[in-house]
Image: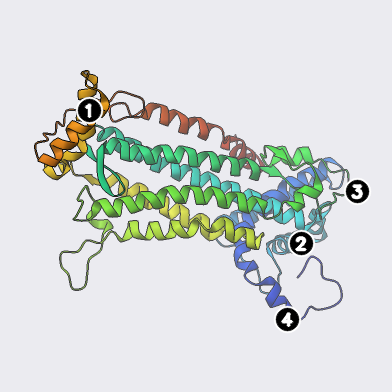
Amino acid sequence: MKLWEKNFEINKEIERFTVGRDREMDLYLAKYDVLGSMAHITMLESIGLLERDELTQLLAELKNIYQLAERGEFVIEDDVEDVHSQVEMLLTRKLGDMGKKIHSGRSRNDQVLVDLKLFTRHELKDIADEVKILFDELIQKSNQYKDVLMPGYTHLQIAMPSSFGLWFGAYAESLTDDMLFLQAAYKMTNRNPLGSAAGYGSSFPLNRTMTTELLGFDSMDYNVVYAQMGRGKMERNVGFAIATIAGTIAKMAFDACLFNSQNFSFVKLPKECTTGSSIMPHKKNPDVFELIRAKCNKLQSLPQQVTLIMNNLPVGYFRDLKDCLQMAAYIINKIEVNEHILDNPMYDPMFSVEEVNRLAANGMPFRDAYKKVGLDIEAGTFKASHDIHHTHEGSIGNLCNDQIQALMQQTLDGFHFERMTKAEAELLGETK
């Protein structure tokens, strides 16, 4: 069954080539196709294109189909072209010609777009939730180890004192910026294309404001040509947001692998997150972080992939990122910090700047202080003091974690996910 079929049969090879894996991917859209149809027919009844009793019966059956999809029991039959055709066919089997009325005033073009947008905004909410979980773990570790010093490096050489508070907190703040990209992608996604039909609207007196409100969109895609012209743009914007988060996680994963190695021994990964060697009994390989890094590096190419395809449905990419976020949050929670790194005198030179600053604060010209400390190091007479007191914002002694948490919460609040969840619950009759 094809919504567009007439009195001829398409070549089977042409069908195989054009349909590809569409049926498999369409299964992800089944729930959202139902929600879009529920809003659309509610609007059709309001403008006189459906009778009240027809709407009641159609909504009841659509809710049954929704539950079918929720249970993972929704299938697209072999001779059915796509999810839209399957939903309409199930309605027609149960309700007769009444089921054929649901397509009035729309095209598969705007139907596909609204399905993708409804699906994508849910995935973005899930990612935002997972980012917040990882963020909270990082902030907790930053606060827990704020007084534990560690070496800071430049050019892979020991540079100046850092702390685990700074290290964990740096990735937490990076995620707050990443969340802004995610929010932007969500806001561009959460606009209603329904009613644009094939790109030129409809002669029916559609109430697009009504479907926008019923589906919990922030606004509609006002211009019907733009609604269709933007195909692939949403996916590309989402791809950039995913890539941005993946970049933060990949960098953190590399740090963790490096710091876990015996040459550093700054941190110890949980045993259950490492693997062994078939011939070397001492090995505890950080496979999880290595895989996270690899997956996240791949995800960073997503915008380019989508740009080249421009109609890609990034189902697998959502799943990959969520998996990486979940695993990273788990390991960060379990990670053990070496609190005695600086007992090794090899790290003493990183306190040289502290000594230069101390001498300068006591009146010695900075350049003279710099030269004196440098000569002491060369002569082997430099004595490092680990007693340091940084006070400025964002330093070892003033992490600003409260402000970073406030930034994250402000961004999360700006998504307004409650509008989406409330609208969908009302459509499904789940609110009291």
Q: Residue furthest top?
A: 363
Q: Give how far across and how far down residue 190 sits, in percent.
A: 65, 42
Image disc number at residue 92: 2
Instruction: Judge by depth and name the residue closer to the eye, 404 or 126.
Output: 404
How far apart marks 4 and 3 lie (CA) works out to: 35 Å
Which amino acid is tagged 1?
A: Asp
Instruction: Judge by depth and name the residue closer to the eye, 160 or 252.
Output: 160
Q: Nearer the viewer, mark 1 or mark 2?
A: 1
Q: Circle 3 sits on which residue? A: 203
Q: Which is more N-terminal, label 3 or label 2?
A: 2
Instruction: Judge by depth and name the residue closer to the eye, 335 or 259.
Output: 259
Q: Which is more N-terminal, label 3 or label 4?
A: 4
Which amino acid is tagged 2?
A: Thr
The quadrant where residue 284 appears: bottom left
Q: Secondary structure at mark 2?
A: helix
Q: Are marks 3 and 1 in contact (CB under 8 Å)?
A: no
How far apart marks 1 and 2 lie (CA) works out to: 89 Å
Q: Residue at x 44, y 56 (%)?
A: 296
Q: Nearer the viewer, mark 3 or mark 1?
A: 1
Q: From this viewpoint, is residue 63 visible?
A: no
Q: Which quarter of the rendered picture does the N terminus lie within?
A: bottom right
Which amino acid is tagged 4?
A: Lys
